[in-house]
Amino acid sequence: MAQDLIVTMWRKLGAKITIEVSPSVFTFYKKDKILSLETYLYLNEREGKHIVAAVGQPPANSEPSIRIDLFSRERALPGTIRRIECLEAFMKYAMAELYNHKTFFRPRVCFKNSESLSPLLLGYQWPVLKLAAESAGASIVEFEGYDWGKPQ
């Protein structure tokens, strides 16, 4: 009962970000803001760590960078880079661009067309996107046309 009340408050008071998904572009919608990002990022290596240099576009600086295509059929990535961590960084960047972090309620995220990733993620697109959105700060993650309680 109390948990239902909390979820209802979050749905009413938290901002909603809708993300239209395709393997090549994610389009983020929040009220009057629209942000389209191609699904790749560039990483720079500094002191043995990978730092995000650019998201959805080539980096502005001339440092050597590694391009990571988030939904490429190419399986191997260089070194210790993990694609899920890159997707999380991608989502964090987009959420920061759209969302005012000074507000109390974290945003609710609704994915549209997530099944477009099925040929690449082999049916695991829902948990992968859910994990990335929650890591980026989403309070509630929903999928248009997908019911977690029913087998697909």
Image: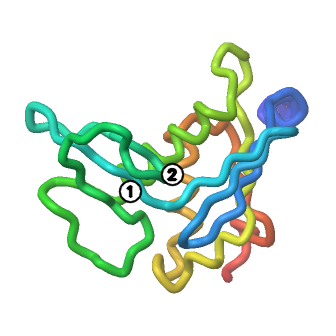
Name, please, the residue furthest toward the left: 47
Residue closest to the eye, 82 or 5:
82
Is residue 131 rendered to the left or right of residue 54? Answer: right
What residue did someone put label 1 on?
Answer: 84
Q: Badge 2: few (under 14), some or many (20 or more) residues near its Cα, within 10 Å?
A: some
Residue 54 placement (x, y as % from top left): 40, 43
Q: CA distance from mark 1 to mark 2?
A: 9 Å
Is residue 143 rendered to the left or right of residue 97? Answer: right
Residue closest to the eye, 61 or 30:
61
Q: Residue at x 74, y 41 (%)?
A: 108
What residue did someone put label 2 on?
Answer: 131
Question: Is 106 located above or below residue 103 in the figure?
Answer: below
Residue closest to the eye, 119 or 33:
33
Callouts 1 and 2 close, C-beta under 8 Å:
yes
Q: Quadrant of the N terminus?
A: top right
Q: Quadrant of residue 118?
A: bottom right
Q: Residue at x 58, y 41 (%)?
A: 94
